[in-house]
Image (spheres, rainbow, N blue to C red):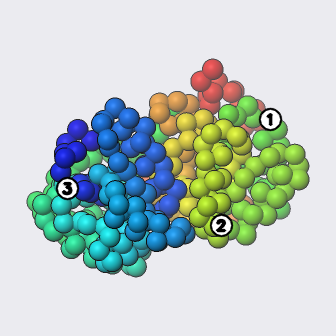
Amino acid sequence: MHQIDFDGAKPQCLILCHTRELAFQITKEFERLGKYFLNLRTETLYGGVPVVQQREKLTQDPPHVAVGTPGRVLDLAKSGHLKLDQLKFFVLDECDKMLEQNDMRDDIQEIFIKTKHNKQVCMFSATMTEESRGICKKFMRTPMEIFIDDQKKLTLHGLSQYYSQLVEKDKTKTLLSLLYKLNYNQTIIFCKSIERAKFLNDILNNMDLPSIAIHRRMSQEDRIEKYKEFKEFKKRILVATNIIARGIDIERVNVVFNYDMPEDSDTYLHRVGRAGRFGTKGLAISFVATDDENKILTDIQDRFAIKIPSLPETIDQTVYRNN
């Protein structure tokens, strides 16, 4: 932000994200910090909202910083409403997730070509495969690679992790029991499919546990509204698919449930990382009901060189609450 020339061409910074919620969150952070910078303008660009409105804003008052998803950004660049030839900074957040998807990767490559070569390129990821690393280097000239932590270790300081071995039909009963017993601020419950997330959300609300759900089949307006509702602490329980497993920061979340185990160890790391952020304490509980889920649990422990213990009868709240 200190390197933006407020009298120069716009935009000077483009940030790409893999979900609309993450783009919305990043824009809000720029706005929060931007109040200390005179006339800083940001714009969020993603699908699900009328493209005509975005074209008008970009034409009438283009932003210094544009944050968006690859599909909509490419559409606006192709139409000439989003100018990319004067960028100083080109940022990909959760780049490995975007580069895994062929259509998104193609969009990013086309956007990259339109930005020319007078910018700094930054790609961020908490987990990076060799394949993704190789693709990143194709985008970059003489790249510098910076490792924050040893990725072989699960470096989630302050996060207590447990698993519960049970049968599938007991998942909901066990979850309800824990929600009544645990002293949580806010909690996110991850499910493996949209149908299961919707079904579980209905059950919780019927049990007088007011919750909200976020998944890809919701309209964009509804998704962002639900995200804001949870972010602003109007609801304490969020049921979700992997759509918010990466990058989303909710300060008060201190308990995460894997109602269904994730498909791999990377996704586990991102999911449980929603709790215990900002140097606070947190708790992650994973339900293990099938041979496949047991295998994933083993893979997680092997990869990150940790031992996840079985869920005890009682959990001392001081391990997941800060006060």
Q: Looking at this view, is 53 or 261 the one in front?
A: 53
- What percent of the width, then of the height, locates residue 249? 51, 44
Instruction: Give amino acid for label 2.
Output: Met
- What percent of the width, then of the height, locates residue 186? 67, 39
Looking at marks 1 and 3 on the same chain, the residue that comes earlier in the sequence is marked by: 3
- Residue drawn at the location 27% of the way across and 47% of the way down: 147
- Residue drawn at the location 48% of the way across and 49% of the way down: 25
- Alpha carbon of mark 3 to alpha carbon of mark 2: how far? 36 Å
- Residue drawn at the location 29% of the way across and 51% of the way down: 64
Q: Looking at this view, is 65 or 301 the one in front?
A: 65
Which labelled disc corresponds to residue 321? none
Instruction: Give amino acid for label 1.
Output: Lys
Which labelled disc corresponds to residue 9? 3
Report helix, strand or loop for mark 1.
helix
Q: In this view, does 310 lie to the left or right of 295?
A: right
Classify 10 Å Cα crowding around label 1: few (below 14), some (14-19), many (20 and above): few
Q: Can residue 22 be seen in this view?
A: yes
Instruction: Give amino acid for label 3.
Output: Ala
Looking at marks 2 and 1 on the same chain, the residue that comes earlier in the sequence is marked by: 1
Classify 10 Å Cα crowding around label 2: few (below 14), some (14-19), many (20 and above): some
Which labelled disc corresponds to residue 218? 2
- Residue drawn at the location 54% of the way across and 45% of the way down: 274
Q: In this view, does 208 lie to the left or right of 105?
A: right
Q: Is residue 149 left or right of residue 229?
A: left
- What percent of the width, then of the height, locates residue 303? 44, 54
> Mark 1, mark 3: which one is toward the viewer?
3
Q: In this view, does 57 lie to the left or right of 48?
A: left
> Mark 2, mark 1: which one is toward the viewer?
2
Residue under numbered circle 1: 181
- What percent of the width, then of the height, locates residue 161? 59, 41
The quarter holding residue 57 reads bottom left
